[in-house]
Amino acid sequence: MITQSSMDKRVDDLVAAIEGQFEESEIEYELSRAFGEVTLQVGAGDWRKAAELLRNHRSFDFEELIDLCGVDYATYGQGEWDTADAPNRGFSRGAERSGLDAVEVEKRFAVVCHLLSLSKNVRLRLKTFCENDPPMVASLNPVWNAANWFEREAFDMYGVLFEGHPDLRRILTDYGFVGYPLRKDFPLSGHVEMRYDAGKQRVVYEPVKIEPRTLVPRTLRHDNRYEGRAAPESEGSDG
């Protein structure tokens, strides 16, 4: 039976192993621990070196890459969903976007992967920030073959380039697609729209005609049924 204390001990052992082996390998890192999970951040230059150490060293044995994704930190901490002053006019309302375009940040794009050690029954989140323009890091495909399609997805959605990837091309969007859909500055309606032209008897692409807007989520409203009356008693009350 797996207990909380045994889980904590495995995490403690992982943190101690990282502190020892990464310093010995001269890899600069940052560690954070919360909710029983460990996040290890390294520089882009040490991305593959750190991955190889985590897979091959007997203190880690991270045999499996579970997931890899990109992250765009532009507009991080900002929001456009404040509905405190929104009028109550239905379940959802169209609102003009508040202009939260991508802003200049020192570190905008990150790559995050989740690792699993089957032999030690422990997980780790490995993270790095891309420092180039366009964003680029080394491919982890030579370390874990499972990184192949994950990296293609991160390239397709965020425009992150993975140096050394054997077949880096789009995987989710259409041929000739322009832009990267999960970047914060990509318009919600896209750049082009597609329709079938009966005259030309083929699909055509045209500039999108939809005005950008944000759908404001439904807000809680005052219930007039109980105006001037006490709140109804709960079910099952003896009173």
Image (cartoon, rainbow, N blue to C red):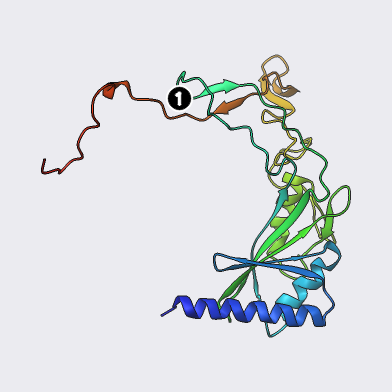
Residue at image coords 57%, 79%: 10
- Is residue 88 in view? yes
Q: Is residue 199 above or below residue 189?
A: above
Q: Position of residue 106 (x, y in %)?
A: 83, 49
Percent of width and height locating residue 76: 70, 44
Instruction: Residue 91: give x, y in percent of width and height.
Output: 45, 24
Specify whether 179 is left or right of 98: right
Residue at position x 68%, y 64% from top? 146
Q: Amino acid at mark 1?
A: Phe
Residue found at x 70% / y 59%: 112
From the viewer's perspective, is 48 left or right of 194? right
Q: Viewed as shown, does residue 212 lie left or right of 231?
A: right
Residue nearer the viewer, 71 or 69:
71
Disc 1: which residue? 91
From the viewer's side, name the closer residue of 121 and 90. Answer: 90
Residue displayed at 76% across by 49% down: 155
